[in-house]
Amino acid sequence: MKARTSPELSNDEFELLRRLVEERTGILVSERKSYLIASRFASLIEEEGVDTFSELYTRARAAAPDGPLMDRIVDAITTNETLWFRDDGPWYILRTALLPRYCAELSEGRRNRVRIWSAACSTGQEPYSVAMTIREFIQDEGLVSVKPEAFEIVATDISPQALEIARRGAYDQMAASRGLPPQYADRFFESSGSTIEVVPAIKSMVRFQRFNLQQSFALLGRFDLILCRNVLIYFSNELKLEIFRKIASALCPEGALILGGSESAQGATRLFQMVRSGRHLYYTARLEQER
């Protein structure tokens, strides 16, 4: 049987679909990237049994925002590019600036838990890397009075497919090899055939949840540390500023924000102050009266 060919994506169809994507996910597809919509949505054309991108748009517009078709659109458009211990900065900041303070406060009874949010966590490498760093720090420092269970890591993403992989915590050799030091693989993973799986002690520290950054952050509570890395680059300037406002409100007093290596809080300086840790930077929310 002759293979079905994908229809051409017209300019009008591209404009409709890019607006739908931005509305539902916040992701701004550049006007120069019609090929991205055409290539990533081609399989949806066949799956839905429609003949044109216009028909796909009409069906998606009529579908429930949290229904199966929109889930597949989200999975198709999101870029789940991630790796273990991505960039040096966050782990240096965590080990040298944040964990010593958190652990001292836990040990002295000045707090009873630390809440950490890994936003746009993709397939789970970032929050699991945070959990491994915490356990390693506690053990290496001999902190018998501090329990890893005092750290609550909430990890969210908009992609159901990415979250399914993250919750399983099982990775093939290709995904496992991307940034994972051998000593961590030996210490925090169990081998199972062609895959390795995060050990239960690490997996239990992370709670995965589906979340769209356009939603109210009040649904998640307040955090001592928010990692929102390599996701704001996909949003409009207006949405970035809105998210910065919500992050500032979601941070506890002296709470910290870590962004991606190519990102900054430029345009939101009245909300955050920059803090230097070695050659790396993170942000803290300014006091309420300063905003």
Image (spheres, rainbow, N blue to C red):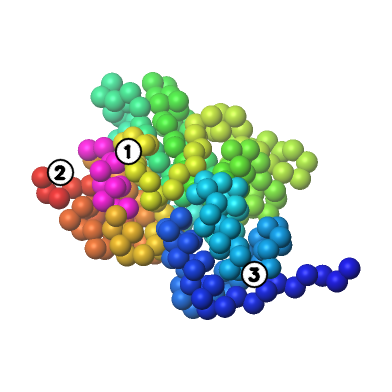
Q: Residue furthest right?
A: 1
In the rendered structure, does residue 250 fall within the stretch colored magenta? yes
Q: Which residue is mark 3?
A: 52
Residue at the spot 78% in from the left edge and 70% down from the top edge: 4
Q: Is residue 104 left or right of residue 66?
A: left
Q: Which residue is mark 2?
A: 288
Nearer the N terminus, badge 3 or badge 2? 3
Q: Which residue is mark 1?
A: 218
Residue 44 position by quadrant: bottom right
The Cα atoms of the two marked residues, 3 and 1, are separated by 40 Å
Q: Amino acid at mark 2?
A: Glu
The Cα atoms of the two marked residues, 1 and 2, are separated by 17 Å
Q: What x and y, as percent, mark residue 10?
A: 57, 78
Q: Nearer the viewer, mark 3 or mark 1?
A: 3
| Badge 1 density bin: few <14, some 14–19, many ≥20, Cα 10 Å | few
The magenta region covers 243-253
Q: Nearer the viewer, mark 3 or mark 2?
A: 3
Q: Is residue 223 left or right of residue 196?
A: left
Q: Does residue 91 lie above or below 204 as drawn?
A: below
Q: What x and y, as percent, mark residue 212?
A: 44, 48
| Badge 2 density bin: few <14, some 14–19, many ≥20, Cα 10 Å | few
SS under mark 1: helix
- Contact between marks 1 and 2 (CB within 8 A): the answer is no
In the rendered structure, does residue 77 fall within the stretch colored magenta? no
Q: Nearer the viewer, mark 1 or mark 2?
A: 1
